[in-house]
Every structure is written in C-alpha cells, then in structure tokens.
Image (cartoon, rainbow, N blue to C red):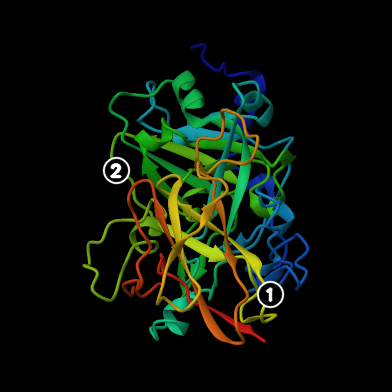
Amino acid sequence: MTPIRATRRTVLASAAVAPLATALVTTGPAARAGAPNILKPLPPRRFVDYGTNAEMRWDSVDPARYHTAQRHLFVRNHTRTPTIDPATYGLRIFGDGLREPRSEADAHVLSLRELKRLPRHVHTAVLECTGNGRSFFASQQDEPASGTPWTLGAVGTVRWEGVKLRHVLRRLGVSPRAVAVMATGLDDEFTSGGTNYGRVRRPFAIEKALDDAILAWAANGEDLLPDHGFPLRLVLPGWIGIASIKWLGSLEVSRRGLTSPWNTTFYRMTGGDYPADSPPLTVNPVRSAWELPWAATLPAGVTRTLTGRAWSGAGPIRRVDVSLDGGRSWRPAELEDPRGRAPRSGPADNGTGWTRWSVRWRAPRAGSYELLARATDRAGRRQPLVTPYNAQGYFFDAVVRHPVTVA
C-alpha cells in the first residue's frame, strides 16, 4: 500500500502539538452538575440529566426508526465535552509497534483531510455504556452498586462513517511484533477521590485494531456532535463504550501489553464472587428492552402489538422469548431485523446493530403485570434471570421485569 507521506503541514503540526494536542482544546469552566458539561440540548422528555452524563429515556425511542439520532443518543463523559478546532486537529500515532518505531515527540500527525483521503468505511454498530442497566442491581436484585443509576437508555445504534484503523496502520507500517494499541482522548484529565488518573485512555489488542476498529468522523450521515467525539473518535464495534474513545488524540502502537486505569482500576469485575484478577471487560453482553414507558397503563380488553429491541456485542440476535405474565409462560417474539441490520442496508452493515421485535397481546384483562423479554444471540449467549453482583454495577444483563397496569 502507498504510505502516508509526512507533509510540511504534518511535520509542523508534530512539532507544535506536543505531547497530545492540548492546544487544540477548549474546555471552559470546571465541571459541575448538569449542562454545560454536555453541550447539546437535553430536553427532559428525552433525557435524564446526570450532570456529566445523560441517559436517553427509553420510552422516547421511535419504534419505526432504526438508527439513534445523535441528538437523542446518551452521553457518557468522565469530565466535560471539549471544543476542538478541526482545522488544526491532528491524530498522533507513535510507538515501538510501528514498523519504523517513533517516540511520542516524533509521532506521525494526520489531519482530518489526510484521513478522509483513505478508503471510506460505513458500519452500523451498537454503542453502549458498560453500566447500562446498573440501577436494576438495586431495584430488582436488592444489591445496590456504585455509579450513574442508568436504566436501559445508555445505548443506541449508530451508522458510523470513517476509515478502518487497519488501513491507517498498514500504510504507516505495523511491526509483526505489535500486540496492543493505546487510544487516548483529548478531554480533561480525570480526577476522582483526590487521585488524578490523567486523560481517558484504554488499550486494546492489535487483532481488534486490524479487524473492525474504525476512526469515525460522522454518525448517521452527519459530522459527529461535540458530545459524541467531534472531530474524530474511535469505534470498536461490539465492545464496551469506554473502549470507543471520544475526541481521539493519539494512538500508541506497542510491542508489549499496555495498561491504564481504565482497564486495571475501572471496567473490570470486582466485588461479589469475582476474583481479584478478573480480566478487563471487552465484548458487551446480550440485552433486551420493551418500548414502553416504565409502569405504563394500557386499556383492558384491547389487543395491541408490543415492541422492543434486543442487542449483543457478540453479533446478531437469534431469538427473543417474551412473557406477559411475569414468567409463568413464554412465547417467541417476531423478529423484524434478525440480521442486526437496518432496513435496506448495504454490505457495510455486518450484523452489529440491534434487532427490533414484536408480540401481540390479545385483550388483556385488568390487573397488574410484569412483562419479560429474554434474548439469545447467535453466539448462544442467553440473558440470565439474575446477574451476578459486582461492585461497579457493570453488565447488568438479566431479564428486566417491566411493570404494566391494565385498566
């Protein structure tokens, strides 16, 4: 492949942007509860505002729309959304895992314009926070866990546009001894409990980098919004949300395993029955949700179609079983998107989106009900009835008991 040439502009940028392009970022006042830590509007009918985080209200999802619009997508920030000038932005790539090793000070610096000259790639994938569903540890299993009390709205399916990371790395040259890549963001350094953990960063295996990893500059046909990583973010399809680093500043390619607080201290299973050496989390579990308001009231004696969605980090959904009577009886739901692809999608959709499903509820009698949905993916993973507890409330994948009143 033709190598990316170091132009005069990138050489000057490399000298001026040391070590991580901090001069390109404007962050404003210190983080505090509520917007302006998040820049896009957060109308209460669509979001629960947690300060640096915002959850999409699940009952605001349009059953007829497959992709999640950026303006409706949940936001997970560690600090606050930075504002970055795309004209002066440069992605820094360095490390001893390159064919010609480079130090951080001597990094390749690639502008957006240079990246957009590479083969364009479009891919639909679910984006999900690792703590999605955390609140159900307390409300459903009586085991409170620390962290933002997400219900099921820290998720969305997005049509990403960008370039495959492997095209970039192979044109720069990757050593056959490379084993890991560290992605680092341009948001503020993260401080918690008096400890400064530095910039948000997380390593991932070179195999993932050379497989389906994407450097994305657009979502659903539009430039990324600042809250979702403008001007460039990493997307690791199927993996936990923290792995898809926003406001991507640098990539270190290494011949040794890399660590950061985001795969050693955070985003590992701790507490409960988990061993102290539990590995860092990667692939998301299988989940499902009803497209109904929580504790909805429905008319008695009226037949209606109930809808929902199921998704998995390991690939398409094979089946969804539902119960309209609290788990006493089950029936299969009808799958609308069994391949995990948007309707009329092209070959770029590889089955990593969610699957919509439906079931007919025939003339229910008045009373209180719990609706259950239990998804199984094509890897054979099935939602459990109970999720083993962990202290951070990650990966709540149990069947959620959705209350409904029929009157």
Where's residue 339, x and y in %? 50, 41
**Which residue sits at x=44%, y=83%?**
138
Furthest residue in direction top, as rendered:
2
Residue placed most toward the observer, 16 or 338: 338
Label 2 Cα crowd, 10 Å radius (few <14 / some 14-19 / many 20+) = some
Where's residue 301, x and y in %? 66, 79
Q: Which residue is mark 2?
A: 257
389 sits left or right of 150 in the view: left
For the image, the number of numbered tags is 2
Residue placed most toward the observer, 123 or 65: 65
Where's residue 22, x and y in %? 62, 47
Say whether residue 197 is visible.
Answer: no
Residue type, mark 2 in image: Gly
Q: Which mark is residue 240?
A: none
N-terminal-most mark, 2 or 1: 2
Q: Which residue is mark 1?
A: 302
Residue type, mark 1 in image: Val
- Against 262, residue 43 (above or below) is below
Residue placed most toward the observer, 355 or 123: 355
